[in-house]
Amino acid sequence: MTNKEHYSVKEEIEKALLVLLSKKEYTSITVTDVVKEAKVARVSFYRHFSSISDVLDTIADQTARKFNIEFLPLMDTSNQRKLREFLFNYFYQISLNHEEMWALDAANISPVSKYLSEKLRKTFQVPDPSAASMSEKYGLAAKLCLLDGVAKKWVADGLQETPEEMIDYVMPVIQML
């Protein structure tokens, strides 16, 4: 167990679900699995959550909030310093946590993506498609796909370049979008 000051049963349950999602199919994960993985009592689970989907919903909410805060620099590419800082944090975190990233079992990609997509649609303002320019409609999606694809390739190739080299490569492409 961690230092009691920083210990949160709720966070342990959320982490446990994420670990289980990398090992088994979402639909076969039970509350018993989660409490065993989190090393908490069943009553603690129900004190914080009503179901497994409630845990996933909470994780999706947190991710959507984080997305809104952290990915906003991608929208304004005129502020090079802020964009560079964002990209450094993005690639640096990947270099530290690449083993845990993209670790979801293939069968779980769909339900997790569904939850996250719903949250992002609710929290992120999408312009009226009939009045929006191509850049307004597709710019963020294109930037996110670019970052995701480049990051996955970087990890697959063994992180041979530094985060700074990745930034120098990606930044001009993002600014074009």
Image (spheres, grey):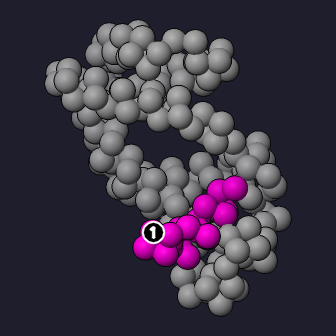
The segment highlighted magenta reads 1-19
Q: Is residue 149 visible?
A: no
Q: Main secondary structure of the magenta part?
A: helix
Question: Which one is in front, 112 or 164?
Answer: 164
Q: What is the tally of numbered marks visible in this picture? A: 1
**Image-based side of 39 in relation to 138, left or right:** right
Residue 70 x/y as whole percent: 33, 42
**Image-based side of 58 in relation to 177, left or right:** right
Identify the residue shown where x is 50% and y is 69%: 3
Q: Quadrant of the N terminus?
A: bottom right
Q: Quadrant of the C terminus?
A: top left
Residue 131 colored in magenta in the image = no
Residue 89 x/y as whole percent: 37, 33
Identify the residue shown where x is 26% and y is 33%: 73
Identify the residue shown where x is 49% and y is 75%: 4
**Image-based side of 76 in relation to 106, left or right:** left
Identify the residue shown where x is 82% and y is 65%: 28
Residue 55 x/y as whole percent: 59, 69
Check disc 1 and report the residue beneath it.
6
Q: Is residue 163 visible?
A: yes
Q: Is 43 situated above or below 98?
A: below
Q: Tell me where residue 18 sits by quadrant.
A: bottom right
Q: Tell me where residue 71 sits by quadrant.
A: top left
Disc 1 crowd rating (10 Å Cα; few below 14, some 14-19, many 20+) is few
Amino acid type at circle 1 is His
Give the structural element (helix, strand or loop) at label 1.
Answer: helix
Question: Which one is in front, 139 or 170?
Answer: 170
